[in-house]
Image (spheres, grey):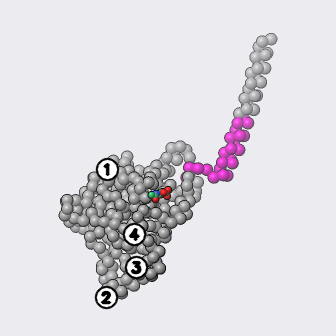
Amino acid sequence: MIWIYIVISIAANICFADDGHEMEEFLKREYSLSKPYQGIGASGSSHWELMGDAMVTTDQVRLTPDMQSKQGAVWSRIPCHLRDWEIQVHFKIHGKGKKNLNGDGMAVWYTKERMQKGPVFGNKDYFTGLGVFVDTYPNEEKHLEAQKKRYTPRTQRIFPYVLAMVGNGTISYDHERDGRPSELGGCNAMVRNLKHDTFIFIRYVRRRLTIMIDVDGQHEWRDCLDIPGVRLPQGYYFGVTAITGDLSDNHDLISLKLYQLTVLRSKQEEEQEEEVTVPSVDNIDLYRPYPDAEGMSSVAIFFTVLFSMLGLFLLIVVGLVVYSHWSESRRKRLY
Ligand SMILES: *[C@@H]1O[C@H](CO)[C@@H](O)[C@H](O)[C@H]1NC(C)=O
Ligand SMILES: [Ca+2]
């Protein structure tokens, strides 16, 4: 947090008089969305466009109601050409479902594509750009439970879970595994049915992606993810989408505020930051430590094999005993 204030105050001192309204100076209204949501959805009259089951009310943009099989979205109409930015998303997820009987979640996007329905929290799969998901339903856990398998402790996570993914148009989001194979990282965020406000914060500065959340009602940002070397092209669209399936929730967007950050770069830095055309993450393998949650560790494999062999041995012994008994009694009967 200190760092961001330094960035802002340096930038503010250079670009504007230090009049105490630095944040205001950076708010880009054309990329922001807040009450009273004038003209959203009406064609052409707003910077934002609605899709699917999304509906504007006086207090929120309701992306989905608490009903099965809905999906909705709101997308910016204008591509964002800012190099360094920060968005604060004020949202609310609530519904009648008890814990883990609700779903599926919502997502904040900065992508090349816009206004396309699909399975990834209401957006298309094989997207190009950044997706930050608030996943409220543990698909993988339920899947493993059904197969009577267990998580190893290192892969266990608590839902709702915030997760980030960078797609380049050829990577699929694995819904059944809650996106683990393609994740950059994330954090737990208890966001459902809360009385206080909940926020997610995404900052992209000097190719560093930082995600923080404020969901505890303490007015404090909590670290969620922070990784360097994230290459995102300019000129993509911001959007927020949500989806329900067999399970549901109200997914409400209350506001989205985009701030332009002015960051000074040395000549050397300028040269190093050549233009990006395809989204990518440097050293991506570092961020995907659990390639196969269903796979077993070598110790587990050893014991499984050992016990299988012991079991087989026991079966053979029992079989032999039963057989010899049977053949003996047969012999007796024959005489
Ligand atoms: C997209 O990412 C995948 C996995 O990291 C990589 O194999 C592929 O080459 C990338 N495609 C492009 C067009 O960069
Ligand atoms: Ca899920």
Q: Name the residue under label 2.
A: 17
Look at the image and tell me whether residue 123 can be seen.
Answer: yes
Between 234 and 122, which is closer to the camera in this rendering? 234
Q: In what element is the residue under mark 3? A: loop
Is residue 301 shown in magenta? Answer: yes
x, y (%) of residue 189? 44, 63
Q: How crowded is mark 2: few (under 14 residues within 10 Å), some or many (20 or more)?
A: few
Residue shown at 77% from the left, 13% from the top: 333
Q: Name the image quarter holding the C terminus.
A: top right
Q: Which of marks 1 and 3 is nearer the N terminus?
A: 1
Q: Which of marks 2 and 1 is nearer the N terminus?
A: 2
Q: Name the residue under label 1.
A: 70
Q: Which of marks 3 and 2 is nearer the N terminus?
A: 2
Q: Residue 263 carries which label?
A: 3
- What amino acid type is highlighted by mark number 4? Phe
Q: Residues within 10 Å of mark 4 (few under 14, many from 20)?
A: many
Question: In this image, 297 relative to 318: left or right?
Answer: left
- What amino acid type is highlighted by mark number 1? Lys
x, y (%) of residue 110? 37, 63
Q: Mark 4 points at which residue?
A: 201
Question: In this image, 142 relative to 316: left or right?
Answer: left
Please provide the residue range marked out in magenta: 293-314
Is residue 124 shown in magenta? Answer: no
Q: Nearer the viewer, mark 3 or mark 2?
A: 3
Between 93 and 11, which is closer to the camera in this rendering? 11
Between 166 and 304, which is closer to the camera in this rendering? 166
Q: In this view, does 52 lie above or below 38?
A: above
